Amino acid sequence: MRVIIKVLLFPVVLALTVIVNVCRFLCHFSSILLSIVAVLFFVLALGTMALLHEVTDGIGILVLAYLISPFGIPLFASWLVERLDDFNYMLKSI
């Protein structure tokens, strides 16, 4: 019975393995690009607050810079990919 379930789940496990690896690559690549953009937004926010004296706009840009930094949305995406990998590992262990 267990062998039949493994045979039936093999295509799912294979697809999940490919999806997880592609998503990991995309997360690492996008994290690098978004880090550069986050630094540019941070400099823009500092310039907005220091030169234009628009503190509320500067804080809004800082929040946006934080969200696209590696500690914001990319961290959440990496967490989701790891949960998908955990599910894949659980299917492999059946």
Image (spheres, rainbow, N blue to C red):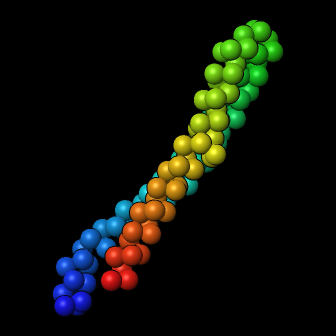
As drawn, the residue found furthest toward the right would be: 50
Residue 71 x, y percent position in the rendering:
64, 45
Task: Evaluate whether residue 29 shows in this view.
Answer: no
Q: Position of residue 55 (x, y in %)?
A: 73, 14
Image position of 57 (left or right of 4): right
In this view, 56 is above or below 44: above
Q: Quadrant of residue 43?
A: top right
Nearer the observer, 11 or 87:
87
Residue drawn at (65%, 36%) of the image: 66
The vertical placement of 8 against 17, above or below, is below
On the picture, is 43 further left or further right than 20?
Answer: right
Q: Position of residue 14 (x, y in %)?
A: 31, 73
Q: Residue at x 49, y 63 (%)?
A: 82
What residue is at 36 percent from the left and 80 percent from the top? 92
Quadrant where the N terminus sits is bottom left
Observer-nearest of 25 and 67: 67
Q: Quadrant of the C terminus?
A: bottom left
Give the image location of residue 41, x and y in percent: 66, 28
* Total numbered labels placed on residues in the image: 0
Q: Residue at x 75, y 8 (%)?
A: 52
Q: Quadrant of residue 61?
A: top right
**Is 68 displayed left or right of 83 in the figure?**
right
Picture quadrant where residue 86 is located: bottom left
Using the image, determine if residue 89 lies above or below residue 70: below
Left or right placement of residue 9 versus residue 82 in this view: left
Residue sitting at the far front: 1
Q: Is residue 92 visible?
A: yes
